[in-house]
Image (tube, rainbow, N blue to C red):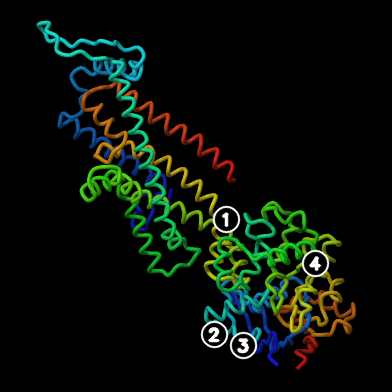
Amino acid sequence: MTAAVQLDDVQVAAAGRVLLQLPRLRIEPGERVAIVGPNGAGKSTLLRLMAGLPPAPRAQVRGVVQVLGRRLAPAPLPAAQRRALRRETGVLMQGLHLVPRLSARENVLVGALGRLQGIQAWRSLLRWYPQALVAEADAALATLGLTDQAGVRADRLSGGERQKVALARMQLQQPRLLLADEPTSALDPAATAQVCAALVAAASGPGRTLVTVVHDLELLPRLATRVIGLADGRPVWDLPVAELNPLTLQALYARPPAGPAAAAAGLPPPTARLARA
Amino acid sequence: MTTLAGGRPWRLARGRSGFALLVALYGALVAACLLSLAGAGELSLGRNPWDNLLKTVGEFARPSFLDVWFGPERLEYRSDDGTLLRVEDRRQVEADFLAALGRATWVTFQIATLGSLLAALLALPLACAVARNLRAPRPLALAAKAVLDVARAVHTLVFGLILVGIVGLGPTAGVLAIALHSMGTYGKLFAESIESLDMAAVDAVRATGAGEAQVFFHGVWPSVLPQFVGHHLYVWEFNIRDSTILGLIGAGGLGLLISEAVSLFQWSRLATLLLVVVALVMSFDALSRRIREALR
């Protein structure tokens, strides 16, 4: 069975600094994986790499990156395949805004553009969508509590509302691989619960995979079955969420930055449990 | 001051003394212009400028359209020995002129409107090719930029003169002249709007797996449309002013009447014409401002 994501000997470097160094990482279809780690650990870099986006400005990628059976790196994908992969990969991250002058509902429908075929794809250029799709968009907004804001222009929504609309847009895309970078960063507790539920629901179909970068560690049991700890661009551990204990997490965030200073202090190498085969 | 130096070869303009040198050069250039004109005897204000000025101002102060109500109904033209040459009903003559003026204004408006629309339509694909963030193939971008630069560099009147020779006298030449020159202006303005776009939103649309046309119509078009409309209204207004001149070269409209009035020294009629031009431009400006505010 092809993995949802498979990385082999991947190294990402930018401006002479190694941002990410992964000997091997395999994520199976249907898994829900969370990536945790302190700031600058390379979490977002890893997520962008899986999304087929440039991991960092002027970054150099070495090694093999395969997503949904397609090889993204080292050689770039042909345009048609890249588009097919984008269609199957739902991405939720800060660098991907809503279109400011479209309404919340129209922004959600943007997610479905890749699903449209033939005459419907042409009609979509005039923002003319099939009724069923509009109903689907309204339902997605309703589950996130945004029924009243469906007609409001995206640039007049609050930060939290925008984040929810972006999630609804990803739901309409019906991707096989869902990648979310801190999906609850601007949300209050109630909205956080809504968004987590919606994310997990969107990822609950057969063979659907969810990878999230998480800062709020209390969300781990809700969002993930497997947790990968990153520090300094390297995986430190890779555990089922049930085996995770507070001490492991504390140790991850308390790690001093690696590098010449750490090496000189004679710190032991991290005990890594990598890539469950 | 170093920025004044521009490229590297211009080292002479460095620093404070360099700036003083530039000012001195500029002064010398102005002096050369003045002296050479004066030397050729071209720097004169004519034989009796003061009388001419007073006469012109006097006639401007009494625009011809007032004659429709206040003019003499029977104006007699006599030769020096007193024989009656011609009788004119000033009211009727000026009423006819006003009717002609109305038709000419409408023609001018037609030229400006159709020319602007054609220019905008021609400029749109070129602007998309030129805008760097849409990443059109480089040869295409360079070709489009060259076309727009040439269009912007050549004046509407020059295009008009060429086109009158090709399509003949009349409004068609005016429409095409406006279109060709404004295409350059539109192209630059449109491309700048596209380049100021929020690319994060465009990337987001692309990331859903949308096709290029879908990305354009959902990510680019909604964001730039209000700016495009604003630019369109601005250039349109500009072209209303420009097309009043086009009649001078036989491209129809108000310009024809203006050139007639100027050649016959009919300052009172010129006053009427200029009042119409100013009213036209001002009312269009007021209207376009309303529309732009509504679109924000």
Few, some or many C-alpha atoms within 10 Å of disc 3 (few <14, some 14-19, many ≥20)? Answer: some
Comes first in the chain, label 3 or label 4: 3
Label 3: which residue? Answer: A64
Alpha carbon distance from label 3 to label 4: 33 Å
Q: Which mark is residue A75?
A: 2
Identify the residue at image location x=76%, y=62%.
A141
Choose between B149 and A253: the one closer to the eye: B149
Badge 1: chain ID: B
SS class, disc 2: loop
Alpha carbon distance from label 4 to label 2: 36 Å
Identify the residue at image location x=45%, y=51%.
B189
Badge 3: chain ID: A
Label 4: which residue? Answer: A195
Q: Nearer the viewer, mark 3 or mark 4?
A: 4
Q: Amino acid at mark 4?
A: Val
Q: Is residue A129 left or right of residue A40?
A: left
Badge 2: chain ID: A
SS class, disc 1: helix
Alpha carbon distance from label 2 to label 1: 34 Å
Identify the residue at image location x=74%, y=77%.
A211
Comes first in the chain, label 3 or label 2: 3
Q: Is residue A35 left or right of residue B218?
A: right
Comes first in the chain, label 4 or label 2: 2
Label 1: which residue? Answer: B223
Q: Amino acid at mark 3?
A: Val
SS class, disc 3: strand
Q: Amino acid at mark 2?
A: Ala
Coordinates of residue B42 in the picture (x, y in percent): 18, 30
Q: Is residue B203 left or right of residue A255?
A: left
Using the rendered image, report if marks 2 and 1 lie on a common chain. no
Coordinates of residue A109 in the picture (x, y in percent): 66, 64
Alpha carbon distance from label 3 to label 1: 38 Å
